[in-house]
Amino acid sequence: MRDFLQRISNAFRRFMTGRYGSDQLSRFTLLLALVMLVLNMIFRTRTSVFYWLVWVCLIITYFRMFSKNISKRYDENTRFLQLKEKIMGKLRGGRAGKAGDSVRDSYRYYQNAYDNARSGGTSGNTMRSDKEHRIFRCPNCDQRVRVPRGRGKIEITCPRCSHKFIKRS
Ligand SMILES: [Zn+2]
């Protein structure tokens, strides 16, 4: 039995090689599928729009996970995270206006990661330390993250793996 599971897991790993896998956006579309499933159960008709939305969400989720166009999927996820940040920022609104608590503020530099991914990683000058920025490497996945200087201790969220680490900028 264990051997069988091992074989399945190996086969799956082989299948996923060179494919994109899951990210924040696919977790979100999967959650959306579940929400639609619940709404469909509430409204209970087979022809309900929610029934189709469940399928749409699932297809998007698995299409993206099994996709081999990794940079395009990465771009989509980046845009999703930027949008989410924008919306969350608006929701937080005036309440979190105290800029002094910079440790509490999460600095997410998705745009940097996006530029970096587009320019093919370390090449190009998009990820250079300068007067206004510092570059840190994510301790978890080695992704380079650019943050503004002089903000004191900040919590940095890695745009690639969402690992959080604290650095002095
Ligand atoms: Zn990372």
Image: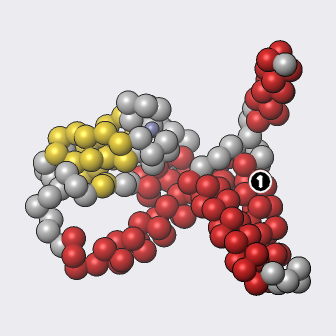
User: From the viewer's perspective, is 85 left or right of 43?
Assistant: left
- Residue 60, how many percent across, how many down? 75, 62
Q: Residue at x 60, y 49 (%)?
A: 23
**Residue 128 can be seen, yes or no:** no
Q: Residue at x 72, y 80 (%)?
A: 42
Q: Residue at x 76, y 48 (%)?
A: 67
- Residue 43, how many percent across, how many down? 76, 84
Instruction: Decide which of 75, 99 is in the foreground and name it.
Output: 99
Total numbered labels placed on residues in the image? 1
User: From the viewer's perspective, is 139 left or right of 152?
Assistant: right
Which residue is denoted by mark 1 in the rendering?
A: 62
Instruction: Decide which of 28, 45 is in the foreground and name it.
Output: 45
Q: Give the quadrant of ligand 1.
A: top left
User: From the viewer's perspective, is 125 left or right of 44?
Assistant: left
**Residue 64 can be seen, yes or no:** yes
- Residue 110, how many percent across, how many down? 44, 55
The kind of residue on which mark 1 rests is Tyr
Residue 38 occupies which quadrant of the picture?
bottom right
Q: How is the image coloured?
A: secondary structure
Determine whether 7 is above or below 46 in the image: above
Specify the quadrant that holds the C terminus: top left
Determine whether 20 is above or below 79 in the image: above
Specify the quadrant that holds the N terminus: top right
